[in-house]
Image: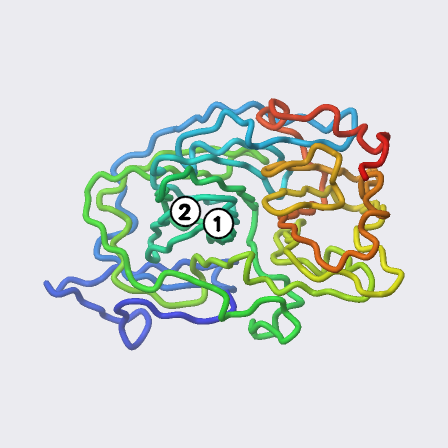
């Protein structure tokens, strides 16, 4: 993360004696990226974070993804998924490649403790609320929040409130950060960034939970690109951190705090970027004033991003460029490389003279082709690819 934080009790000097009230030493855990050469945090545990009493295989039932073949644009209706359970083991995988996996979950019950040892996660809340407990402390999330969870953080998600927690999850094989062009060489948000440190939230106090023989599900790397799961049993509850400091920790940013960049003519998607990961970017489209050149056409022009697949998650308002295509709340569209995509018939003419778009969407552009997982195919609108052949919707 761009800035340093200190939470709870820590000693004056790193790697020196720091004792509990009974005289025993706290147990240090340095959690760091890139082999001691990048961001890190130092956590102080009441018990040894290395003490496990068992390790067992866990094998979720998942079908292998399939290529997008024959190549065509796709539309998936996530609200038709037969999804329920928790926000971790209940994830329905939709799209994946060697760099990331995109999933959707509808959670009504607390998740188990979980650690993703493959990469960072970005969890976007479509609706509902939750209390997220982590080894760094707890944080509450709700509609419109992005939760960025660093690789190998132990956490669990507890839905709160009367409605299910609906989340879109981007699991990375590396690290997810703000767009580099928004940051100074020392990591501070620059003046042209559409958000800054004031917009971020993170755990504010330690979370201490007692317990013994506590299970933690770990997703980790196997041979090649294989993903494996192991269930560890820890001798003591891993939420036993009395204090920590550093620049690596979970943090939350609300889509509603994104300040859109607008112009006299149509702005390309990089103007809407929020985060970046290995071989992918995350953007969002928020309610905003649109193009104000007297001859402007506010909706996007036809475009073919030859290096990337484009995924759009439609999560609020009215996405004018897709009107008449069947897109609805919770829809996901996939526009792959090899296909020129653009506004639906009639959208350019309808948009002329518009001053404001009331739309909310999250976009993921990947620079390697995405494959299709079975849950996505189960809720596919198979007519979507042909909607550009229809008469304009007026």
The answer to whether 93 is drawn above or below residue 303 in the figure is above
Front position in the image: 59 or 126 = 126
Residue 142 picture location, percent across and down: 44, 50
Instruction: Look at 41% across and 67% down and name the residue there.
Output: 246
Front position in the image: 219 or 325 = 325
Q: Give the crowd class for mark 2: few <14, some 14-19, many >=20 residues within 10 Å.
A: many
The answer to whether 244 is drawn above or below residue 168 in the figure is below
Residue 30 picture location, percent across and down: 38, 60
Residue 194 picture location, percent across and down: 62, 66
Secondary structure at numbered mark 2:
strand
The answer to whether 387 is drawn above or below residue 15 in the figure is above
Residue 55 position by quadrant: top left
Q: Which residue is mark 1?
A: 143
Q: Is residue 62 left or right of residue 216?
A: right
Instruction: Look at 36% across and 60% down and name the residue there.
Output: 203
Q: Is residue 338 left or right of residue 166?
A: right
Q: Which residue is mark 2?
A: 129
Structural distance between the alpha carbons of marks 2 and 1: 7 Å
The mark nearer the N terminus, 2 or 1, is: 2
Furthest-front residue in view? 394
């Amino acid at each position: 993360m761009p800035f340093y934080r200190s939470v709870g009790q820590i000693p004056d000097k790193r790697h020196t004696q720091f004792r509990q009230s009974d005289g025993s030493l706290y147990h240090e855990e340095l959690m760091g990226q890139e082999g001691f050469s990048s961001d890190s945090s130092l956590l102080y545990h009441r018990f040894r974070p290395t003490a496990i009493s068992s390790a067992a295989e866990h094998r979720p039932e998942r079908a292998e993804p399939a290529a997008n073949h024959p190549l065509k644009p796709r539309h998936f209706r996530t609200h038709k998924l037969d999804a329920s359970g928790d926000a971790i083991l209940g994830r329905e995988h939709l799209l994946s490649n060697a760099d990331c996996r995109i999933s959707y979950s509808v959670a009504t019950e607390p998740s188990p403790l979980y650690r993703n040892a493959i990469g960072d996660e970005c969890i976007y809340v479509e609706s509902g609320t939750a209390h997220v407990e982590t080894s760094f402390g707890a944080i509450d999330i709700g509609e419109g929040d992005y939760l960025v969870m660093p690789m190998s953080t132990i956490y669990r998600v507890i839905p709160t409130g009367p409605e299910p927690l609906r989340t879109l999850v981007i699991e990375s094989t590396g690290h997810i950060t703000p767009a580099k062009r928004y940051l100074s060489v020392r990591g501070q948000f620059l003046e042209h960034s559409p958000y800054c440190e004031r917009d971020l939230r993170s755990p504010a106090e330690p979370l201490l939970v007692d317990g013994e023989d506590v299970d933690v599900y770990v997703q980790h790397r196997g041979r090649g690109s294989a993903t494996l799961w192991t269930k560890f049993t820890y001798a003591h509850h891993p939420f036993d951190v009395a204090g920590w400091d550093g620049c690596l920790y979970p943090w939350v940013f609300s889509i509603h705090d994104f300040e859109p960049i607008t112009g006299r003519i149509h702005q390309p998607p990089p103007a809407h970027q929020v985060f970046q990961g290995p071989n992918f970017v995350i953007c969002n489209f928020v309610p905003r004033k649109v193009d104000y050149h007297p001859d402007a056409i506010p909706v996007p022009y036809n475009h073919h991003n030859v290096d990337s697949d484009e995924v759009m998650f439609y999560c609020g308002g009215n996405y004018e460029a897709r009107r008449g295509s069947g897109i609805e709340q919770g829809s996901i569209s996939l526009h792959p490389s090899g296909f020129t995509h653009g506004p639906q018939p009639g959208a350019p003419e309808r948009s002329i003279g518009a001053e404001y778009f009331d739309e909310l969407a999250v976009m993921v552009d990947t620079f390697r082709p995405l494959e299709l997982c079975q849950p996505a195919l189960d809720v596919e609108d198979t007519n979507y690819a042909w909607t550009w052949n229809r008469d304009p919707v007026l």
